[in-house]
Image: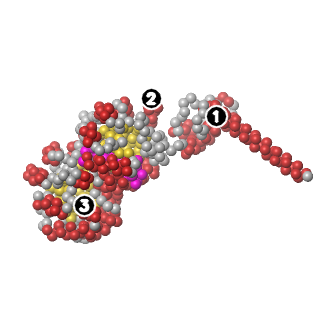
């Protein structure tokens, strides 16, 4: 496990083009509590090169002494082992697998993550009962991501962030919980109040690169 | 006046020559027409006809069955005199062959070759594949995640012109971005997961229509594909019934759901693709069960020529039906 369980993290997902992402990363405050995510469309567009560049830029920004944490949002559905190996060798610190994938794939994914010495994240997007998947696994993942998809959030305003699940999972398992899909500052803050360890954001960053740094700074100030 | 007579003589000679030349061409043309019984002419026929004019007419019989283009090169390897010309004509024919239209036809059977490991291996496989409209090339998910958009561009560049390229994006969210990316790279179809939120699948199909590429919904780990299809605003072009690689490796008893092919085709007018078979028998079984597309891939223990021979036997099979 590469994350400190006692700390709260802000994970920022990047899905834009390389130059824009580079600009955004340069605007971020240098802190180990900020996690950089290579979003699925970003990975599919730039591949291993994209992950390696993100790591290079963030390492340069953090400077020596601080460890960068890069998440490759692979959303594995099959052939987990090939993809995890590729992400790890590109410099990722964690990779994601879909909770919707066959149990065999998730098991293989977690095993391969341990072999490659990176954190395993299981993304529970569209999974109705995440705590029903966990007991079926041979080994627990490091992080569980509770998720409301972007398309869901835009198309279907009634869908809520699954905040109530955080405690249900934490009560049973000793896992780190990450919450994805919040689109407003209010949602982000209420996620931390509901005991999420990591909150994944992307929305405000589409609109203005400057908002990236201001939200990150606000996070570092308010959430300790 | 002498010179004027010479000029007239030259002109007459030239006219006679041209006339003679035209006559020869006409005769050849008539011969070929007779042999082929109409239809498009190509270089090979003309050369054949020319050589039969030069040689005694014992071997002028045209082949009873039209030869597939791939066998031209095989023929040329047998070292008969005058066969170098035939090899050349084979090349000419390949260059002149009509570029296959990259759109799926209903009622036609397709074999989809999935490329998953590295770009080098993909190149090896593509070079060995027989050229045919019925063979689709898939850029596998691992290739896309390792090389990015470049994987699609490179494979398109390696493949023969007009090859139908499927980008196995396995989209689960942010469908608009992924479809745009795939369409820009030049793919003809993209895939979306059936387990994804319905909103994502709807956006995915809409975007595919917008970019005029085919939408494929991959039903891996979906228990009842029909239930998903009924919830959609618009139907996809293709539904993929899937048994995952990890699944088939670690629990052998999981079967490809063949009965669902008819179930889907009975309810909706869409093409069904079956993924997860890797032997010639499984491919046949899928087609026998009315699948339109069968997806195959090369396993670690297989050689690239096995994949090529699987493709060849598929082509032979669909011809005889």
Question: Which segment is the magenta one?
Answer: B182-197
Whether residue B143 is visible here, answered yes or no, is: no
Judging by the rendered image, the residue that carries numbered circle 3 is A202
Residue designated by label 2:
B321
Q: Where is residue B67 in the image (x, y as percent from the top left)?
A: 54, 34
Q: Is residue B212 above or below residue B79?
A: below
The residue depicted at 25 percent of the width and 54 percent of the height is A154
Q: Which mark is residue B241?
A: none
Asked where in the image residue A200 lies, by quadrant, the reply is: bottom left
- Nearer to us of marks 3 and 2 is 3
How many residues crowd around disc 1 within 10 Å: few (fewer than 14), some, or many (20 or more)? Answer: many
The x, y position of residue A72, in whole percent, is 27, 57
Q: Mark 3 lies on which chain?
A: A
Residue A4 is situated, as x and y percent measured from the top left of the image, at: 15, 61
**Taking the image as drawn, is residue B63 in sight?**
yes
Number of the front mark, 1 or 3: 3
Residue at left offset 32%, top offset 65%: A20
């Amino acid at each position: 496990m590469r994350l400190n369980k006692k700390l709260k993290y802000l994970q920022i997902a990047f899905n834009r083009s390389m130059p824009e992402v580079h600009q955004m990363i340069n605007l971020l405050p240098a802190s180990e509590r900020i996690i950089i995510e290579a979003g699925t469309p970003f990975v599919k567009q730039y591949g291993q090169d994209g992950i390696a560049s993100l790591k290079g830029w963030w390492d340069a920004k953090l400077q020596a002494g601080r460890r960068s944490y890069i998440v490759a949002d692979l959303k594995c559905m099959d052939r987990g082992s090939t993809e995890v190996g590729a992400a790890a060798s590109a410099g990722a610190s964690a990779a994601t697998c879909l909770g919707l994938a066959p149990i065999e794939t998730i098991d293989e994914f977690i095993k391969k993550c341990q072999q490659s010495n990176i954190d395993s994240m299981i993304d529970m997007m569209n999974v109705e009962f995440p705590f029903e998947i966990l007991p079926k696994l041979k080994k627990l993942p490091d992080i569980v991501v509770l998720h409301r998809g972007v398309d869901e959030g835009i198309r279907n305003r009634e869908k809520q962030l699954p905040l109530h699940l955080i405690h249900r999972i934490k009560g049973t398992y000793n896992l780190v919980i990450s919450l994805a899909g919040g689109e407003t500052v209010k949602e982000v803050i209420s996620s931390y109040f509901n005991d999420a360890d990591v909150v994944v954001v992307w929305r405000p960053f589409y609109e203005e690169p400057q908002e990236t740094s201001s939200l990150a700074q606000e996070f570092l100030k308010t959430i300790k | 006046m002498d010179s004027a007579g010479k000029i007239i003589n030259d002109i007459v000679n030239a006219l006679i020559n041209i006339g003679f030349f035209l006559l020869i061409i006409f005769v050849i043309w008539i011969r070929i027409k007779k042999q082929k019984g109409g239809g498009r002419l190509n270089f090979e026929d003309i050369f054949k006809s020319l050589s039969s004019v030069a040689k005694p007419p014992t071997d002028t019989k045209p082949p009873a069955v039209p030869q597939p283009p791939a066998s031209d090169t095989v023929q040329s390897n047998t070292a008969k005199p005058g066969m170098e010309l035939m090899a050349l004509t084979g090349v000419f024919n390949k260059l002149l062959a009509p570029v296959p239209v990259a759109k799926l036809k209903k009622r036609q059977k397709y074999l989809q070759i999935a490329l998953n490991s590295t770009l080098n291996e993909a190149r090896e496989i593509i070079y060995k594949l027989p050229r045919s409209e019925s063979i689709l090339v898939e850029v596998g998910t691992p290739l896309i995640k390792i090389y990015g958009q470049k994987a699609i561009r490179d494979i398109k560049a390696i493949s023969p012109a007009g090859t139908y390229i499927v980008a196995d994006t396995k989209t689960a969210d942010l469908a608009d971005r992924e479809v745009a990316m795939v369409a820009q790279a030049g793919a003809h179809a993209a895939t979306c997961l059936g387990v994804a939120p319905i909103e994502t699948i709807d956006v995915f199909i809409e975007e595919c229509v917008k970019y005029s590429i085919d939408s494929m919904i991959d039903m891996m780990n979906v228990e009842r594909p029909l239930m998903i299809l009924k919830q959609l605003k618009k139907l996809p072009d293709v539904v993929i019934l899937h048994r995952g690689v990890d699944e088939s490796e670690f629990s052998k008893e999981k079967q490809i759901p063949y009965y669902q092919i008819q179930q889907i085709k009975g309810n909706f007018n869409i093409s069904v693709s079956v993924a997860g078979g890797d032997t010639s028998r499984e491919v046949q079984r899928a087609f026998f069960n009315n699948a339109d597309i069968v997806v195959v891939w090369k396993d670690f223990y297989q050689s690239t020529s096995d994949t090529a021979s699987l493709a060849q036997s598929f082509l032979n099979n669909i011809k005889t039906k």
